[in-house]
Image: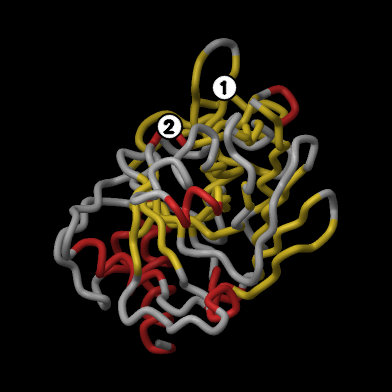
Amino acid sequence: MDTTRRAFMGAVAAGVAAAQSGGGVKKFVRYRHGGGVHYGLLEGDSVREIRGNMLEKYTATGTTRKLSEVKLLWPCDPPKVFAVGLNYKSHIGNRPAPKVPEIFYKPITCLTEPEGNIVIPPAAKNVHYEGEMVVVMRKRAKNVSVQEAPEYVFGVTCGNDVSERDWQKNDLQWWRAKGSDTFGPMGPSIAVGLDFVKSRLTTRVNGEVKQTQVISDLLFGVPEIVSWISKHATLEAGDVIYTGTPGATSAMKPGDVVEVEIEGIGILRNKVASA
C-alpha cells in the first residue's frame, strides 16, 4: 500500500504539471456570477476566473472576484457519481471487512452546492451525515491497473454521502436512501497536487466534532478504488467517487449545520432543512 501511495503522489505531482504549470496545491472552483456559471482558481479570499477545460488545459481570463461576490457550486459537473461503502475499519465495527471495494451509484440529482440545504424528505425519519473525501477523475479510465490508476485522477474534494438509514436497511436498493435530492453535498474546491493521504477528515454538527480520521486509514486507497471500478464500468473525465466515511454517524434534524472539513481542501458547509 505504501509503495502504491508513493506512486500515486508522484502521479499527482505530474498531473498538476500536466493540468497547468506552476507548483504547489491548486484549488479549482465552479461558481455562479452575473447569471453565468464559471470556473476559477481559489486564491485566498479571491477567485481568478479561467477559460477552457480545467481537466486538460485552461487560461486565465484576467478577471478576479472576491469570494464573497460569487456563489460556489459543486466544483465539477460529473457524468456519473460513484460511492464506496464500508471503507474505514472504524465505520465497519464488528462486521467483516470487504474483500474488494464495495461500490454503488448516487444519481447526479443528489448533488448539492456548498451552503446549500440538505432537505429531509417528508417520509424520512433517520437521515445521517457521512463525511467523505471525493475523488475527481481527470480522463477516461477503462481496465486500468492499480499502478496506472493515479495518472487518471485529477484531484480531491469534500463530500457528504447523506443516508436515510431506515430506507437503506429496508429497501431493495439504495436509490432513495443515498440518492434522494440534496443527499450529495460536494465542494467547496477541488484540490490538485495535495498529498491528501496525510490529511485529516473531520465532520462537525453544530460545531461539535462527530467524525475524525486521517485519509490514510482508508481500507482501499484511491488507486485500488479507481482500478476496481474501471474494470467493470468505464470512468469518464469529471466522474466523482465518494470514498467512504469513518466512525459512527447519527441522525440530523432541520436547523442543524453540518461541516465536512479535509485539511488542504476546505470546509463543506450545509444546513439541514425539512421538505
Local SS, label 2 = helix
Q: With 252 as the anchor, is 149 left or right in this view?
A: left
Q: Evaluate if marks 1 and 2 touch, with contact meaning CB atoms under 8 Å apart.
A: no
The answer to whether 173 is drawn above or below residue 99 in the figure is above
Residues 53 and 59: in front is 53
Quarter of the image with the N terminus is bottom left
Instruction: Say how the picture is coloured.
Output: secondary structure
At which x and y percent is residue 100? 31, 77
The mark tally for this picture is: 2
The mark found on residue 32 in the picture is 1
Q: Residue at x 50, y 32 (%)?
A: 181
Q: Is residue 6 left or right of residue 89?
A: left
Residue drawn at 61 percent across, 57 percent down: 131
Q: Which residue is mark 2?
A: 109
Q: Quadrant of the C terminus?
A: top right
Q: Single out the residue that lies furthest toward the front.
A: 170
- Badge 2, how many Cα within 10 Å: few under 14, some, many 20+? few
Q: In the current view of this chain or complex, which residue is farthest to the top?
A: 35
Foreground residue among 240 and 57: 240
Give the mark, 1 or 2, whose residue is nearer the N terminus: 1
Q: Is residue 275 above or below residue 197?
A: above
The numbered disc on residue 173 is none
Question: Which SS class for mark 1?
Answer: strand
Residue at left offset 69%, top offset 29%? 274
Q: Which amino acid type is shown beneath numbered disc 1?
A: Arg
